[in-house]
Amino acid sequence: MITNKVEICGVNTSKLPVLSGKEKEELLIKIKQGDEDARNKFIVGNLRLVLSVIQKFNSRGENADDLFQVGCVGLMKAIKNFDLSVGVKFSTYAVPMIIGEIRRYLRDYNSIRVSRSLKDIAYKALQAKEAILRESGAEPTIEQIAQKMELEPKQVTTALDAIQDPISLYEPVFSDGTDTLFVMDQVSDKKSLDENWIEEISLREAISKLSDREKNIINLRFFQGRTQMEVAGEIGISQAQVSRLEKNAIERIKKSFD
């Protein structure tokens, strides 16, 4: 799958706009008031987020255009359901929903047949998870979901395992539209949670808003391990200028996480 090509589904990805945090908030307010133009502008301004998400499925050999279209459906659902009063960034809310939409698409086209009874348990687990999340405001464990369903935790885990892609046991199993539920992570390994991946996307978004020179300095300093003196020599400015530009860039990145 090629996700870095210029055009996907007729969209020139090299010319997609990047919205500032303030622009996003202003557009979201207008969207809640029924402004269709604001909604369309917000969708276009967040297509880069969809592109970032579909790269997660790069190794599956799926068609990029198909995944992009499905991801856009998830994006539109996120826009419809996003609540500004919750106090979280839109990308933090939208990424799990986009992932979930793509996973549902992949699951529906999975060649492995899953029994109807297991599917029913899995979908009821989704509903139980959503109910618990609304009541407590916290991500429920498998044990809590199983207790609400009056089932054994193993039954819930087996059902969720059955509807997930068998080659990705340590990735999110599904998304119910508000958050991503991890079955295997709740059992043991917690190193690959989507929360970390979401933070990585947010970091890339923040860096994309820097000037070309600031991007270059951040890349050389923190991704290639160069010293300020080495960076200064490479780009032809003084070490003091490198230090100032680096400091300003880091401050701007930090503010994007506030």
Image (tube, rainbow, N blue to C red):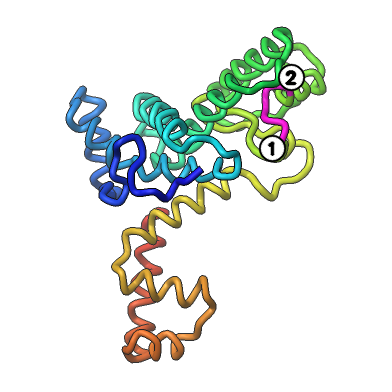
Q: Which quadrant of the view contains residue 70? A: top left
* Residue 193 rendering spot, x and y as whole percentages: 63, 44
Q: Amino acid at mark 1?
A: Ser
Q: Which quadrant of the view contains residue 114? A: top right
Q: Is residue 163 one of those drawn in magenta?
A: yes
Write the start and end of the magenta stretch as one range: 162-168
Crowdedness of circle 1 by 10 Å Cα count: few (<14), some, many (20+)?
few
* Residue 217 rendering spot, x and y as whole percentages: 40, 76
**Which element type, helix, strand or loop, lies under badge 2?**
helix
Q: Is residue 218 one of those drawn in magenta?
A: no
Which of the two discs, 2 and 1, sits closer to the camera? Answer: 1
* Residue 27 rendering spot, x and y as whole percentages: 23, 37
In the depicted structure, whether residue 139 falls above or below residue 6: above
In the depicted structure, whether residue 161 falls above or below residue 185: above
In the depicted structure, whether residue 216 falls above or below residue 140: below
Tell me which label, 2 or 1, sits earlier in the chain. 2
Crowdedness of circle 2 by 10 Å Cα count: few (<14), some, many (20+)?
many
**Residue underneath mark 1:** 168
**Residue underneath mark 2:** 159
* Residue lying at 30% horizontally and 36% vertically, measured from the top left: 10
* Residue lying at 36% horizontally and 83% vertically, measured from the top left: 242
* Residue lying at 40% horizontally and 30% vertically, measured from the top left: 69
Q: How many marks?
A: 2
* Residue 139 rendering spot, x and y as whole percentages: 61, 32
Any part of residue 148 in sight = no
* Residue lying at 71% horizontally and 13% vertically, measured from the top left: 149
Any part of residue 45 in sight = yes
Predominant SS along the magenta part: loop
Q: Which quadrant of the view contains residue 180? A: top right
**Which element type, helix, strand or loop, lies under badge 1?**
loop
Q: Amino acid at mark 2?
A: Ala
